[in-house]
Image (cartoon, helix red, strand yellow):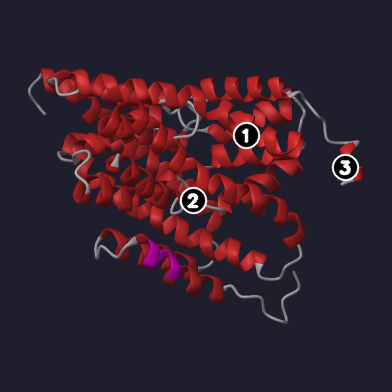
């Protein structure tokens, strides 16, 4: 039971940090789920996060996988509700207010100011994730190739990500990684 | 609002759920925003492009994921509180079910060398995906040199000096908002 409360507290807290996308919460997610509560190892967290990028819909459904690891189905449901309810309510009520704030002179300042900080948080998440995922030159090459492909073409990201997994298996087969 | 009722369509709650469920099940590869626009603006014509962009800018400023924030805002606009609820459930249900299944499968066989090799590969690929998101987000958001300074300071503080995210968010956020504060001579 205590684990469910811990899950609820951790994911409700993390949800409030997801400004600019789920990646902004990644540094604290690593800190709490790996280092503080030991629910998953860092590689496991990376694996769930990456699998989550392959699932349809919102890209942080991997919180359900962490929930499963901790406390099966109840854990998954608690993690999901905790992760989506607080920000959901905030969006619901602020969304109704927002139109009234259209002429508020601080609105552009908040939008631009928070925007750059959000990009900074996503960058921090990318750095922390890169430290765990890019363990050899080959994996750096994979990341760079996916980046260039997605940046330069309109290909669906699911294809190069699945291809990365297959390359990972090939590297394993040839004993390179 | 009474004026708006004549122009905003009112799909049934079941229809709303179904349309969001289909988008939640088919938006593979993370680019949910593109799927939302195709579904809501082009196919259903529940929103026009101006409204879509306005709701998207609210979604991006507030905490929460774009996909769920958009579901809440669009659902509320079309069918009020219940609309927000069914739209969000539809959007989340397919991905959540898959990731719950993934959690169980991982527990059963995730330690095998082949699945580890595959997962390590997609983790590297996901880093590339995040870098693209970062570049696209940056191109839209960062306008002045100062904005880049805020980005680097926030990222270095969190990733290298282990500053807890809330402190970094509040401190850098206040400075950045103050930097862009409304000035009297500005005509916005």
Comparing A155 with A26, the one in front is A26
Looking at the rendering, the stretch of residues picked out in magenta corresponds to B166-170
Label 3 lies in what chain? B
Q: How far apart are marks 3 and 1 (CA)?
A: 21 Å
The image shows residue B142 at horizontal and vertical percentages of: 52, 60
Please tell me how crowded label 1 is: few (under 14), some (14-19), or many (20+) other residues with Cα within 10 Å.
Answer: many
Does residue B64 show up? no
The stretch drawn in magenta includes residue A166? no
Label 2 lies in what chain? A
The residue sitting at 15% across, 24% down in the picture is B111
In this image, B166 relative to B116: left or right?
right
Q: Earlier in the sequence, mark 3 or mark 1?
A: 3
Please tell me how crowded label 3 is: few (under 14), some (14-19), or many (20+) other residues with Cα within 10 Å.
Answer: few
Q: Which of marks 1 and 2 is in front?
A: 1
Q: Mark 1 points at which residue?
A: B85
Quadrant assignment for the C terminus of chain B: bottom right
Q: Name the residue under label 3.
A: B4
């Amino acid at each position: 039971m205590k684990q469910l409360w811990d899950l609820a507290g951790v994911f409700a807290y993390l949800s409030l940090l997801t400004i600019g996308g789920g990646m902004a919460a990644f540094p604290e997610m690593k800190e709490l789920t790996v280092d503080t509560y030991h629910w998953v190892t860092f590689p496991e967290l990376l694996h769930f996060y990456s699998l989550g990028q392959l699932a349809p819909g919102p890209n942080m459904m991997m919180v359900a996988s962490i929930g499963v690891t901790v406390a099966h189905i109840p854990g998954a449901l608690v993690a999901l509700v905790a992760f989506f309810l607080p920000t959901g309510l905030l969006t619901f009520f602020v969304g109704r207010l927002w139109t009234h704030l259209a002429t508020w002179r601080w609105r552009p300042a908040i939008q631009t100011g928070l925007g750059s900080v959000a990009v900074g948080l996503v960058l921090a998440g990318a750095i922390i994730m890169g430290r765990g995922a890019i363990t050899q030159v080959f994996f750096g090459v994979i990341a760079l190739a996916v980046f260039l492909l997605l940046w330069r073409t309109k290909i669906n990201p699911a294809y190069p990500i699945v291809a990365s997994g297959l390359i990972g298996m090939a590297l394993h087969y040839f004993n390179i990684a | 609002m009474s004026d708006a009722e004549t122009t905003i369509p009112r799909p049934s709650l079941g229809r709303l759920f179904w349309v969001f469920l289909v988008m939640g099940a088919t938006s593979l590869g993370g680019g949910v925003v593109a799927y939302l626009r195709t579904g809501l603006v082009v196919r259903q014509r529940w929103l026009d492009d101006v409204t879509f962009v306005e709701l998207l800018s609210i979604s991006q400023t507030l905490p929460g994921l774009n996909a769920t924030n958009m579901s809440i805002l669009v659902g509320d606009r079309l069918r009020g509180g219940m609309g927000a609820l069914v739209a969000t459930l539809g959007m989340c249900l397919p991905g959540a079910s898959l990731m719950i299944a993934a959690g169980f499968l991982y527990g059963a066989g995730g330690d095998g060398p082949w699945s580890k090799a595959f997962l390590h590969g997609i983790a590297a690929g996901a880093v590339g995906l995040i870098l693209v998101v970062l570049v696209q987000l940056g191109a839209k958001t960062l306008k002045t040199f100062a904005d880049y300074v805020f980005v680097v300071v926030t990222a270095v503080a969190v990733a290298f000096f282990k500053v807890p995210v809330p402190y970094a968010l509040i401190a850098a956020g206040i400075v950045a908002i103050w930097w862009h504060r409304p000035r009297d001579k500005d005509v916005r």
